[in-house]
Amino acid sequence: MIDARAVVAPEAQLAANVKVGPYSIIGPGVVIGPGTVIGPHAVVNGPTTIGADNQIFQFASIGDAPQDKKYRGEPTRLEIGDRNVFRESCTVNRGTTHDQGVTRIGSDNLFMAFSHVAHDCQVGDQTVFANCASLAGHVEVGDWVILGGLTAVHQFCKIGAHAFLGGGTILSRDVPPYVMVAGNPAVPHGVNAEGLKRRGFTEEQIRNVREAYRILYRSDLLLAAALERLAPLAQQQPEVRFFFDFIRGSQRSLVR
């Protein structure tokens, strides 16, 4: 299952049915789970743990050192879940000691060509990074988030679950769950209702989310007043509670 032209470090741990294409390099400290396919001309360096049934296409660079001038070669790591797809020329870096020391990617994500995940990022499940979408360091991305092509996210931003970032978005603030944003700088453009329908949200739940969005973005309220208005709804509606808790916990300020 390993092409004779590939270079695999003796210390690497590959499940029996892992496939490695020609001219790919698997470094020491790499652990790769069953069913994963590494295409030709890819590089995977460690410490990196990759789960089952992932696909890594040609020229991808997975698990190399962080692009951080403060990094001095300390042992940090990358953790990747299952069934992710990393298309051509994706780059994913390990963490730094200036954070948790680990970059984490969940499961069932699609990273299109030339997308980038920087050091110490935390990416959930079922996300889509379109071509050339890029995260700076320390970014958190929730489940089911979609980043349009050429999107750029500033370091330490948080993007809530089910959010949608249009192509070419330049993001320097937090995006609450369910919200669609676009532009440079990013501004809100409503609720990702179509995405919520596809994921099984009921019409009532979507109405509740729309009302929460209206209170935050369309009522001309200061943030504290909007949170006060949202609080009783959050007590009764779990989908609004999720929205409310994210806003209350934001430290970077919100896209508004």
Image (cartoon, helix red, strand yellow):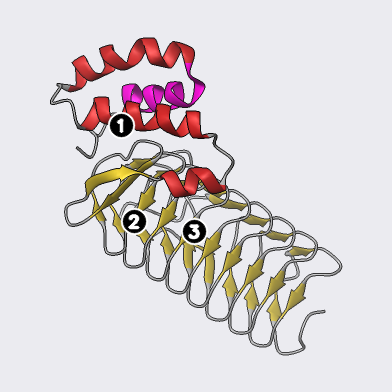
User: Image point 45% across, 49% down: which residue?
Assistant: 194
Report the predominant secondary structure element of the magenta stretch. Answer: helix
Give the mark toward the camera: 1 or 3: 1
Q: Quadrant of the C terminus?
A: top left
Quadrant of the image occupied by residue 82: bottom right
User: Image point 34% across, 56% down: which residue?
Assistant: 68
Vertical order, 131 against 169 (above or below):
below
Q: Which residue is mark 1?
A: 213
Quadrant of the image occupied by residue 219: top left
Q: Amino acid at mark 1?
A: Tyr
Tag 2's secondary structure?
loop
- Per the rendered image, the range of residues in magenta is 237-250
x, y percent for residue 21? 70, 83
Residue 1 lies within the magenta run:
no
Q: Give how far apart the Cα atoms at labels 1 and 3 are.
A: 23 Å
Give the mark toward the camera: 1 or 2: 1
- Compared across the picture, whether 85 is left or right of 121 comes to right
Give the mark, 1 or 3, whose residue is nearer the N terminus: 3
Q: Which residue is mark 2?
A: 68
Q: Amino acid at mark 3?
A: Val
x, y percent for residue 34? 80, 62
Give the mark toward the camera: 2 or 3: 3
Vertical order, 112 against 68 (above or below):
below
x, y percent for residue 209? 40, 30
Tag 3's secondary structure?
strand
